[in-house]
Amino acid sequence: MTQVEAVPGPEGSAVHSTFRIEQTYPHSAAEVFRAFAQKDLVRRWRVEDDNCVVHEFAYDFRIGGSEVSRFSFAGGPDIRLDAQFQDIVPDRRIVFVYRMAVEHTTMSVSLATVELTASSDRTLLTFTEQGVFFDGIDSAQGREEGTRALLEKLAAQLLR
């Protein structure tokens, strides 16, 4: 589900979007949650990539804790993610807000919720993001596609 509305601002545009992605993993909720909770696992599936250079990565997984990721792709500009964890219920829910920037220009600000629903030997992950994307630097569609790719990387990480 994607809802997009363009709202012109005095210095550019702001596009608001909400999307939801559901993916089932053949793992327990505890295993899926651990992939979000452990710094080394998060770095592997969310930050590292073949064409990516990681310049900075800090991760403090607790309510009020934060993440800072700074990286670049194939010699491109620095991309920075600054996040803060708002709510954590082990094996069930993670809520965080995050800002993404290219160099010193804000691309987007989002509220994201990860919900885990366990059933026997599998877990349904529901990822919901409410975001605002600024000045055409990033797009709601691109963010949704990127999030789907990250959830596929999570699947591969869980198989390790």
Image (cartoon, grey):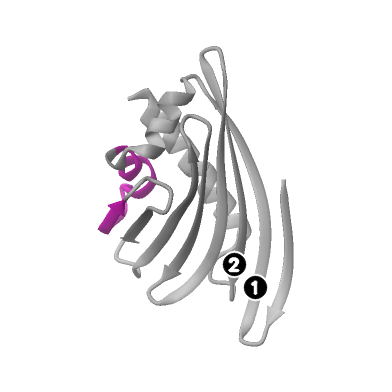
SS of the residue at dot 2? strand
Query: Is 2 left or right of 27, judged from the image as shown?
Result: right
Residue in the picture at 74% in, 65% down: 5
Position of the C terminus, as image quadrant, is top left
Query: Is residue 130 on the magenta stretch?
Result: no
Residues at circles 1 and 2 in contact by the CB criterion of under 8 Å: yes
Q: Which residue is mark 2?
A: 133
Q: Residue furthest bottom?
A: 10
Image: 47 above or below 69: above
Percent x, y of residue 14: 65, 73
Query: Is 146 left or right of 44, judged from the image as shown?
Result: right
Position of the N terminus, as image quadrant, is top right
Span highlighted in magenta in the image: 41-59
Q: Counting residues from the N terminus, which is met first, the one under dot 1 or under dot 2?
A: 1
Residue 73 appears in the picture as rendered: no
Image: 155 above or below 142: above
Count residues near mark 2 (Cα–Cα under 10 Å), then give few for <14, some for 14-19, many for 20+.
Answer: many
Residue type for callout 1: Ala
Percent x, y of residue 113: 57, 45
Image: 45 above or below 125: below
Residue in the picture at 53% in, 18% down: 122
Residue type for callout 2: Phe
Residue 44 falls in image quadrant: top left
Residue in the picture at 57% in, 55% down: 111
Q: Which mark is residue 14?
A: 1
Q: Between marks 1 and 2, how big is the CA–CA gap?
A: 5 Å
Percent x, y of residue 98: 48, 59
SS of the residue at dot 1? strand
